[in-house]
Image: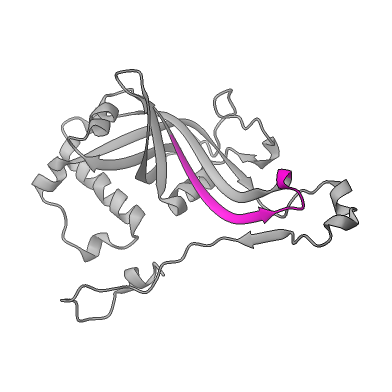
Amino acid sequence: MAEEKAFDKTPLNTVGRLPARGSYDKDVIKSIIEEAKVGHVAWVDDEGLPQCIPMLGAVEDIDGDLFIYFHGYQAARFVKSLSEQGTRMVATFTLIDGYVLALSHFHHSMNYRSAVLHGFSLPFGSFAHEKGKETELKAEKFKLVVEAAVPGRWEHARTPDDTEIASTGLIRMQVETGSAKRREGGPKDEKKDLEDPALKHIWTGVVPVTRTAGAPEPMDFVNFAPPEHVLNLQ
């Protein structure tokens, strides 16, 4: 069966406002998650209260099905809530690419890329081929989360022991549907403003935003140069 490269448009994921900016391509969505790294995870708790927490996320594509992994302390309330099979979840990831400064306040904006994913929690062991392999799978996906945060780091640090794996909660979200949205380019000024001589003194344009890491700062006991995977973060 051929992999589905894009999500079908549904009432849940269809971009309503400025639909031309929307995308349902799974590769586009994955690229946003991988670059943003931190997403906001929302759900309704057992008391009926809405909750939303920023969490490091790692995305995995298995034959066209997307899964996102989030980790936290095993005993934390949100981990317990999201560990229950079938808990409905929404995860959003956002990247700011520029400040858009227009002639009028109304048309000021941001250039951005965002992804909104709808799905549900799926504990390890949910699939027939996973039965009896929950701990092994959890350790495997723990590596996925570490590599999503710092590519190449897994081979350059001590691997977690059984106690550490047991104390770490790992939430697996199966994505049912999702979409991405992007704004790029300059401000969309009104014709009347572009032609108004009184506004010619106003600076208008785009200020790009980029994310950069600073120079590595080693601990006192480290007396050797940073390895390549650390330098690649700059």
Residue shown at the point (38%, 38%) measured from the top left: 67
Residue 173 magenta-highlighted: no
Residue 97 magenta-highlighted: yes
**Residue 11 visible in the shown view:** yes
Residue 125, relative to residue 101: is it above or below? Answer: above
Q: Which residues are magenta?
A: 91-106
Q: Is 166 positioned to the left or the right of 218 in the image?
A: left
Residue shown at the point (74%, 62%) measured from the top left: 203
Q: Considering the whole magenta stretch, tell me its main secondary structure.
A: strand
Residue 192, relative to residue 74: is it above or below? Answer: below
Please tell me which residue lies in front, 157 or 182: 182
Residue shown at the point (31%, 29%) measured from the top left: 122
Q: Quadrant of residue 157?
A: bottom left
Image coords of residue 58 (percent x, y) = 36, 46
Q: Quadrant of residue 154?
A: bottom left
**Residue 137 visible in the shown view:** no
Residue 130, relative to residue 228: is it above or below? Answer: above
Q: Quick one: which residue is furthest to the front in this view?
A: 198
Q: Quadrant of residue 19?
A: top right
Please tell me which residue lies in front, 156 or 80: 80
Q: Is 206 positioned to the left or the right of 128 in the image?
A: right
Image coords of residue 111 (percent x, y) = 62, 51
Image coords of residue 37 (percent x, y) = 40, 50
Tell me the quadrant of the picture where the C terminus can be found. bottom left
